[in-house]
Amino acid sequence: DTKSQIEIRDLEGNLIEILQINGMGPKWSPDGKKIVFDTVFPDEVASNKRATEIALYDLETKELKRLTNLHGISSNPDFSPDGKQIVFVVWDFGGRAKNLGVINVDGTGFRRLLPEKEAIGISSPDWGP
């Protein structure tokens, strides 16, 4: 099972750290201290569910935190401009974007933004400028 990795580099291109995880689509927090991404956690790989969840890596504490545990497909996270919340896409297993989720960076306060019967076609949410 090959793992992808996220390389963290400074502005000169010097390698600071390598995260050996199945992480995709990393986004920096506005303060540059955290990275959010979607990943398949080891328990999902072991169970063959292959669900992607939203994870947060803190560069100061070196802590990797699982923010979601939806046992589905959560992807394409992005920080709010104030860095306090993360928006992401909640997919159904048929591969269709179903809803937008928002969660606080500490993993609390998850909510879906649209009524459950709504289906959307957005794949890369963005808080905007």
Image (spheres, rainbow, N blue to C red):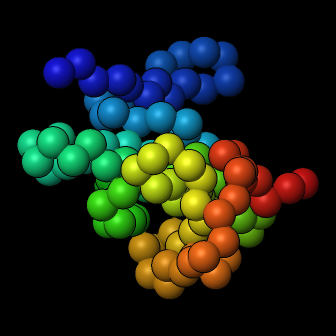
Identified at 55% across, 36% down, the residue is 25
Q: Residue at x 17, y 21 (%)?
A: 1
In the image, residue 82 lies at what x, y percent? Answer: 74, 69
Q: Is residue 23 above or below residue 63?
A: above
Q: Nearer the viewer, residue 32 or 96?
A: 96
Nearer-the-camera pick, 20 or 95: 95
Please state which of residues 34 and 45 is positioned toward the viewer in this rendering: 45
Q: Is residue 66 left or right of residue 26?
A: left
Residue 30 point in image, percent of width and height: 71, 55
Point 57% across, 77% down: residue: 116
Rendered view: 106 above or below 53 = below
Q: Is residue 75 left or right of residue 125?
A: left
Name the residue at the left extreme: 46
Residue 50 visible in this rendered orientation of the protein: yes
The residue under the point 50% across, 84% down is: 109
Can you say whether 119 is above or below 7 in the image? below
Q: Quadrant of the C terminus?
A: bottom right
In front of the other: 31 or 2 = 2
Residue 34 position within the rendered picture, expressed as x and y whole percent measured from the top left: 53, 52
List the single residue furthest toward the top.
Answer: 13
**x then y, percent, for residue 122:** 71, 51
Vertical placement of residue 127 versus 9, above or below: below
